[in-house]
Image: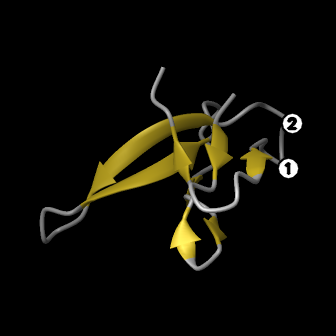
Amino acid sequence: MATYECSTCGMGVKTQCARCDTELVNDTITLDDGKIVQVAVCPEGHGKIKSPLCCGDDMTCKVA
């Protein structure tokens, strides 16, 4: 399961698709300008979300 953690306060978030209850998996996408963005993806094809925010910064997920 993709677990995002805040590097400032240590808060963590586990992600799950609300449509099918499947655990989201960590992935990245590359934007048109070449920047790589961390996302959590539904493996059943229901979409993806950008990493959540905490303490004003993106939370990160360790790639397994």
Q: Residues within 10 Å of mark 2 (few under 14, many from 20)?
A: few
Q: Residues within 10 Å of mark 1 (few under 14, many from 20)?
A: few
Residue at image position (76%, 54%) is 11
Residue at image position (65%, 32%) is 44
Q: CA distance from mark 1 to mark 2?
A: 5 Å
Identify the element where label 2 is drawn: loop
Residue 14: image location, x then y, percent: 77, 42
Horizontally, residue 29 falls left or right of residue 15, namely left
Vertical comparison of 24 with 38: above or below: above
Residue at image position (53%, 72%) is 57
Residue at image position (58%, 79%) is 56
Q: In terms of depth relative to the viewer, which is nearer, 41 or 56?
A: 56
Residue denoted by label 2: 21
Horizontally, residue 63 falls left or right of residue 11, namely left
Residue denoted by label 1: 18
Cβ–Cβ below 8 Å for labels 1 and 2? yes
The kind of residue tagged 1 is Ala
- Report the residue that reaches farthest toward the top: 64
Disc sitting over residue 53 in the figure: none
Residue 8: image location, x then y, percent: 60, 62
Residue 4: image location, x then y, percent: 64, 46
Residue 33: image location, x then y, percent: 13, 71
Q: In terms of depth relative to the viewer, which is nearer, 34 or 13?
A: 13
